[in-house]
Structures are given as C-alpha cells and as structure tokens.
Amino acid sequence: MKQPASNKVGFISLGCPKALVDSERILTQLKLDGYDIVPSYEDAEVVVVNTCGFIDSAKQESLDAIGEAISENGRVIVTGCMGKGDDASIIRKLHPKVLAVSGPAAYEEVVGAVHEYVPPVINHDPYTDLVPPQGVKLTPRHYAYLKISEGCNHRCSFCIIPDMRGDLVSRPIGDVMEEAERLVRAGVRELLVISQDTSAYGVDTRFRTGFWNGRPLKTHMQQLCEALAEFGVWVRLHYVYPYPHVDKVVPLMADGRILPYLDVPFQHGSPEVLLRMKRPAAAEKSLERIQAWRSICPDITLRSTFIVGFPGETEQDFEILLDFLREAQLDRVGCFQYSPVKGAKANDLPDQVPEVLKQERWERFMALQQEISSARLQQKVGRDIEILIDEVDSDGAIGRSPADAPEIDGKVFLDGATGLKPGDLVKATVTGADEYDLWAG
Ligand code: SF4
C-alpha cells in the first residue's frame, strides 16, 4: 500500500438533506481526528464519495462521481445510500479499485476506512485543534438541518428507503438538543428538523425520557418542539405525517414559538391509490387534520409532495386527487410523475400508467396547483412579514419568509436592500407576488 505523504482528504457529497447531514457528521469526525479536507483531487490522499441511491438518475450521478474520483485520484472510499445491498455490488463490479464501501449513516465504518488508508496524525488533540464548535456544516452558516432519526417503520410500495436505511431509530433527545444548542451558539438562525417520519420520533424507544442540561425530556415530537422553541430561532418541521398528535404541536406555531409551517408528504388524495401505495395515512382523515390545523393556526403554511401516474391510477382517482387539492388549498406543492425505483414493490403492480398519460396528468395537476399557490401568495400582498436573508448582491437582498424552506420553496426579493447580510432577520411589507415568489420593501 502506498504510504500517504499527508493527511489530506477530498470529499464529494451527493443527495438529499439527510445525506448532507451524514456528510457533515463524517467531516466533523475527520476534522476532530486531525485530517485536512481539501477541495481538489490532486491534493487529496484519498477521496470519500457520499452517494445517493434514491432514484436511477441519482445512482448514475453517484457512479459517475466515483468513476471521476478514481480516474483523477485513484484512492476512493464510497459511503451512503448506494453502499448497501445490490448497489454496493454494482459499485464493486464497475469500479473494482474502490478501497472500501459502506452504507448510509455508517460513520464509524467510513471514518475507519479513512484511518486505514490515511493513518491519522498522532499528535492531533481534538480539544485544541481548530474544529468549529458546531461541527463542519455544508449548508450556509445561518441555517442547519437537524436530523432526529434514521430509517422508517413504514413500507410504502414505491420506496426503498427502509431497505437502505432500516427501521426507525430515533436519536436520543439529549444528543439532538446538544447539537441544536451548539448550532445556535455558532450563529444558526434556523433549524430544519428532518427525518423520514418526524411525527414518529421516539416510537422505537417508547418515548424514553432523556436528559438535556440535567432536565428530563421525553423522546417525543411535541417535547422536542417545545424544547427547540426555547432557543428563539426559527424551527421548521419537515416530513410530518398527519397523525392526531401533530395537532398538539400546531398551538406552538399559533403562539409563534416554532414556525407555522408543516411539510406533510400526502402523495395522493385517492384512498384507493393510497392503499396501493401502502401509505401511513388515509385521505379523508388528512383533510380533517388540515382543517383542524387551520382552525388552531390560520396562518399555517402547508407544503406537500404528490405522485401522479402511480400504477392503477384511473381517471377517477386522478379527479379525486384534483378535488383533494382544491379542498386542501395547500401553499406549496411538489409533484412527481411515478417512475419505478429498482427494488420497490410497486414495480410489480398491474396497470402501469403510460408515459403520455402521466405527463398529461402532471400538467393538469400543476396548472391547478399554480392557480391555488398564486391566489394564496396574492393574499399576502400588503402584509408585514419577517424575512431571513440568504444572499445579498448589488441589486438587493434575497431571503425567505417563515413560509419558505430553503431550496424547495419560494424566495422573497428585497430590491435595493444592499445594506443587509446573510443571516439578518428583517421585517418588510409584501409589495408583489407571482406563482412562487414574493417581493417586499
Ligand atoms: S414513509 Fe414511506 S416513503 Fe417515507 S421513507 Fe418511509 S417507506 Fe419511504
């Protein structure tokens, strides 16, 4: 084995916010162990590639990244969602020179592999070296993702995440709170709570009591939200299912303690389709929950994602979905055309929907939702809103309101506001709106 001349590691991070959190953890550990993270193939002694295996195009991107790292550097360690099961075998077959392969959230394995191929610097002292106290973050400094659990107990027929990441494992609430506290101390103004199923937090531990700063706290979504609210920063909840206990978190939103925002992946409105999808919540109950949330917190922003063209979806199912949209009046919506994912149970379902029909339904869905979103955004014109600034350039500032999660929702443009900086929290009056974004001044 070639003896490394330095302790420099290259790192390529692909995939969703959950994979990004894994990357941040691995990078933090590597820094604590005395490694330098370098931005070029030539300087690195080894390159770690954190892969994404969610859909076929993401897998191809991961395989391409591994191939490039091998040809540019030669010493490559692979980790992440593609590092498990059949995909791991594909990686080894296509790229036999890869030094080690590990699965998602396998922090010890991947850091262990780096240690094996680039031994850590012996004299490094993790308590005196310059690792930022909040760890290494790949998101901008003023917002951070806070992952509260791994895996999922559901078995939706289109999804292979439980096969890749296993059943739900909740992080101890004390660890989550300590991480959040470190992030806030380091200047983070917005915490984005993520997991595969945020409303199920703690189910696997029977809501075990943990401790934060000596105070007992249950491993439970409501207690977590109440505790996070004490930091006085924006707290945004993602991947929440419409279970009745979510109603107890909505009053915290009405009181301004956490952001009035819920990201709820409904996926469809037809009970028949939801049944075939093996989704955890039924459609009629979802509409009831939405009504209940809006009666507690009229200003709540609801975001969701949907799939059109799922196997067996009839014109009638699709019409039911459009009716659901009309009734639900969601603020932010993403829509995907169903496409099979290798290994998912839905691939074997009968009555696959032809591509042209998927496209046609997607267009009808988007046209309706655009009308709904623009009407809802228009209602904000003239109102005062809070804005967290993300970017500033010579034309002005761009930020987000409590209704906008980074990267997936809209933006707020503050033309001419050049005296601001990222992370500033300002108030302004909404002066205009289109289907996605707002203008304020
Ligand atoms: S809830 Fe369903 S879609 Fe979400 S991760 Fe679990 S199995 Fe996959």
Image (cartoon, grey):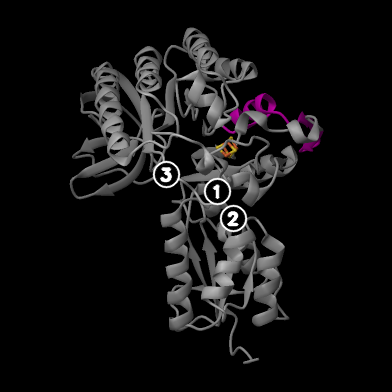
From the viewer's perspective, is 258 left or right of 401? right
- Per the image, is 230 magenta? yes
Q: Which residues are magenta?
A: 209-231
Question: Alpha-carbon distance for marks 1 and 3?
Answer: 22 Å
346 or 42, which is in the foreground? 346
**Cβ–Cβ below 8 Å for labels 2 and 1?**
yes
Residue 136 image point, x, y percent: 56, 59
Q: Using the rendered image of the protein, determine whether residue 84 is visible from the camera's viewpoint.
A: no
Say which amino acid is labelled 3: Ser
Q: CA distance from mark 2 to mark 1?
A: 6 Å
Q: Residue beneath label 1, please? A: 18
Q: Residue at x 69, y 47 (%)?
A: 166
- Give the residue number, with chain letter if any, for mark 2: 22
Residue 8: image x %, image y %?
A: 55, 79
Residue 385 lies within the magenta run = no
Q: Judge from the rendering whether residue 262 lies leftward or rightward of residue 117; answer left or right.
A: left
